[in-house]
Amino acid sequence: MRKLFSGSTLKVIAVSAMLLDHFGQVVLKNGITLKVPYSMFTDFQFSNLLNIIDVLHMIGRLAFPIFCFLLVEGFMHT
């Protein structure tokens, strides 16, 4: 069976996904939407910002299953 991704590649993908999720939650959600006055944004800009936060959150949710897969793979090969 041919491997599509190596373990190192999967780790980089998972860490990148987690970093995007944390950026969206810490910087965009807690930093901008909660600290900056709502009047600085138009409704369109604010809804786009919330959509971006949701997309980054969905991307970040991929990290946990990848890390679990790598954990099981490591357990099976030791």
Image (cartoon, rainbow, N blue to C red):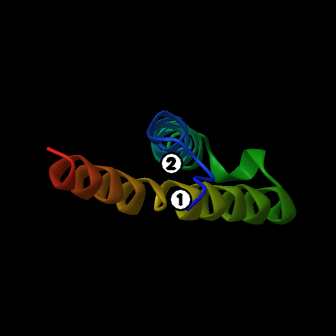
- Give the residue displayed 47% in from the left and 48% down from the top: 25
Q: Nearer the viewer, residue 63 or 49?
A: 63
Residue beneath the point at 70% across and 65% down:
51
Quarter of the rendering occupied by the C terminus:
top left
Tell me the SS state at disc 1: helix
What percent of the width, then of the height, locates residue 19? 50, 37
Tell me the kind of residue under disc 1. Answer: His
Report which quarter residue 52 is drawn in: bottom right
Labels 2 and 1 touching (C-beta < 8 A): yes
Label 1 neighbour load within 10 Å: few <14, some 14-19, many 20+: some
In this view, the residue in front, 17 or 42, is 17
How many numbered discs, if any?
2
* Residue 21 or residue 36, whichever sits in front: 21
Q: Secondary structure at mark 2?
A: helix
Rendered-image quadrant of the N terminus: bottom right
Image coords of residue 2 (percent x, y): 60, 56
Characterize the local packing of mark 2: few (<14), some (14-19) or many (20 or more) Cα atoms within 10 angstroms.
many
What x and y, as percent, mark residue 31?
Answer: 51, 37
Q: Name the mark on residue 57.
A: 1
Q: CA distance from mark 2 to mark 1?
A: 5 Å
**Horizontal side of residue 56 vs 46, given as left or right:** left
Is residue 21 or residue 75 the one in the foreground? Answer: 75
Counting from the top left corner in percent of width and height, residue 24 is at 55, 46
Kind of residue sitting beneath label 2: Asp
**76 sits left or right of 57 in the view:** left
Say which mark, if any, is on residue 21. Answer: 2
First along the sequence among labels 2 and 1: 2
